[in-house]
Image: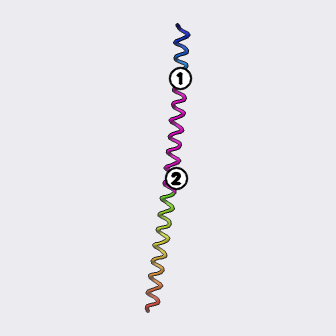
C-alpha cells in the first residue's frame, strides 16, 4: 500500500515538473513572439519616419525650385 502511495506521489511530482517545463516553454515562445512583433513595429515606425523626412525634403526642394 505504502509503495503504491509513494509511486503515486512520485508520478505527481514528475507530472508537475513536466507541466511546469511546458508552461515555461510556452512563456518563452510568447516572449519571443512579442519581441519579434516589437521589432517589426519599430522597423515600420522607422520606415515611416524616413518617409516623412523624405517628403519634407521634397517639399522644401519644390519650394526652393518655385522661388
Q: Which residue is mark 2?
A: 36
Q: Height in image: 58 above or below 1? A: below
Q: Is residue 25 magenta?
A: yes
- Res. 13 mark: 1
Q: Is residue 33 magenta?
A: yes
Q: What residue is at 53 percent from the left and 42 percent from the top?
A: 28
Q: Height in image: 43 above or below 66? A: above
Q: Main secondary structure of the magenta part?
A: helix
Within-10-Å neighbours for mark 2: few <14, some 14–19, many 20+: few
Q: Height in image: 19 above or below 43? A: above
Position in image of residue 13 (x %, y %): 53, 23
Quarter of the image with the C terminus in it:
bottom left
Q: What residue is at 52 percent from the left and 32 percent from the top?
A: 20
Q: What residue is at 55 percent from the left and 24 percent from the top?
A: 14
Within-10-Å neighbours for mark 1: few <14, some 14–19, many 20+: few
Q: Which residues are magenta?
A: 15-39
- Whichever of labels 2 and 1 marks the residue nearer the N terminus, that label is 1
- Secondary structure type for disc 2: helix
Q: Quadrant of residue 18?
A: top right
Position in image of residue 56 (x %, y %): 45, 78
Using the numbered discs, state the Cα–Cα distance from disc 2 to disc 1 in whole angstroms: 35 Å
- Res. 34 mark: none
Amino acid at each position: 500500500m505504502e509503495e503504491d502511495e509513494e509511486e503515486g506521489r512520485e508520478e505527481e511530482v514528475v507530472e508537475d515538473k513536466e507541466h511546469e517545463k511546458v508552461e515555461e516553454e510556452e512563456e518563452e515562445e510568447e516572449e519571443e513572439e512579442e519581441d519579434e512583433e516589437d521589432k517589426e513595429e519599430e522597423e515600420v515606425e522607422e520606415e515611416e519616419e524616413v518617409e516623412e523626412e523624405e517628403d519634407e525634403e521634397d517639399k522644401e526642394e519644390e519650394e526652393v525650385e518655385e522661388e
